[in-house]
Image (tube, rainbow, N blue to C red):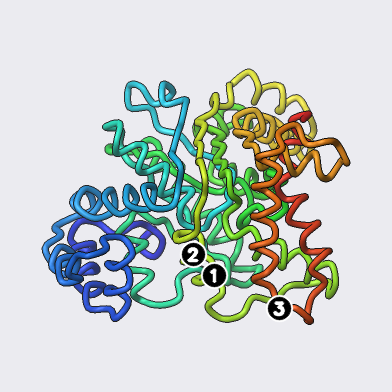
Amino acid sequence: MYEDIRPYNDAETAAALKRASNNRLMEQISAFLFPGKDPDILRNTLNTIHGVDDFQTRVMYPAVRSIISKTTNGLSYDGLEWFEGGQTYTMLSSHRDIVLDSAFIQYIFKGNGLPLSEIAVGDNLIYNQFIEDLMRSNRMIKVSRSVSPRELLETSMQLSSYIRMRLSDEHPASVWISHRNGRTKDGNDTTEQGLLKMLSMSGSRDFPENMAELRLMPVAVSYEIESCGIKKAYEIYIKQMMGNYIKRPGEDLESIIMGIMQQKGRVHVAFCKPITFEELSDCAALDKNERFRSLARIVDERILDGYRIWPSNIVAAEMLTGRTPSDKYEAAQFEKYLKEEINTLPKHMVDRRVIRDILIRIYATPALRKGF
């Protein structure tokens, strides 16, 4: 029933990583993650992996640790007490980076001896067998997006049923899923009601009991330096100018690589208070559409409360509202960042001033929403 969307099992992972070890990109991946080491070391390691947990221990955990060391000024987190006793959740997460939002969460779990979650990822990111092998070996659940409207109902029910099953089967696991379709591009983290409706589809009880079975936990992931910030600003600019933005083939892969390699400043993950049965009961008292709207607002409020506001957000909010900088050093650093990012754009094909303003707003929005 779930063969086409579930993560690989141990035997499938071992076979998949043997295939992946021969890919021509492996040398570049090794050079970035493990500089100075012979790429054959990574290849040989992949060839001797015997299962999912072995892959996490020997490859993924050291790889993410290397990314944190090279590209961040520290990864912090709070809220792990909610996972005591082996409790599992549907983690509705803010989503800024294609790969690293969930990778950082897995790293936190692994470092604290907690069971790793499974990760819902859109099939639009599955370009070839190599990408599929790496992702499904890394506990990925495939989310079908490139399907007809008629097929969408069937695939949504399948995903909803799978998530519900994974939370409560013999060997339960939490599931990470973005609280909206795709990354937040404008800094405004809002939950899509459609996602909540999809999750509810497989329930057989009334609204509060149905949603309570999913154990919804909002998660806030915040970066001091916005992941792929200039690309997001450019995409918003094109949408404003043309009414639509059409991605080039391979653009998502470029964003994955850019997100991994760029500097991120500090990163914080907040595992927020799970949605309570009382809150779900309050939502149930409303009409059908309003109850999902109300639930989305609760998730949004939790994520906003947990979102860590960085100096970059405050400086941007001050710039946008015309206030005098409260920290001149941070303001100068942010101006330097803006200049460097804008200089990556073509000089005569876009309005750099407009894109600069969009980028400032991306950073300012979380701070303004929190009252700064």
At label 3, the amino acid type is Pro
Q: Position of residue 48 (x, y in %)?
A: 11, 63
Q: CA distance from mark 3 to mark 2?
A: 21 Å
- Residue 49 rendering spot, x and y as whole percentages: 15, 59
Tell me the quarter of the picture where residue 232 sits.
bottom right
Query: Which one is closest to the eye, mark 1 or mark 3?
Result: 3
Q: Which mark is residue 284?
A: none
Q: Secondary structure at mark 3?
A: loop
Q: Are marks 2 and 1 in contact (CB under 8 Å)?
A: yes
Residue at the spot 63% in from the left edge and 50% down from the top edge: 180
Point 78% across, 40% down: residue: 317
Mark 2 neighbour class, 10 Å CA radius: few under 14, some 14 to 19, many 20 or more? some
Nearest the viewer among 161 and 119 is 119
- Answer with left or right where residue 129 lies relative to residue 353: left
Q: Which residue is mark 3?
A: 346
Please give the residue where the numbered disc 2 appears in the rendered image: 256
Res. 252 mark? 1
Which of the two discs, 1 and 3, labels the residue nearer the N terminus?
1
Amino acid found under the numbered disc labelled 2: Ile
Residue at point 71%, 38% (across, down): 328
Contact check, label 3 and label 2, Cβ < 8 Å: no
Q: CA distance from mark 1 to mark 3?
A: 20 Å
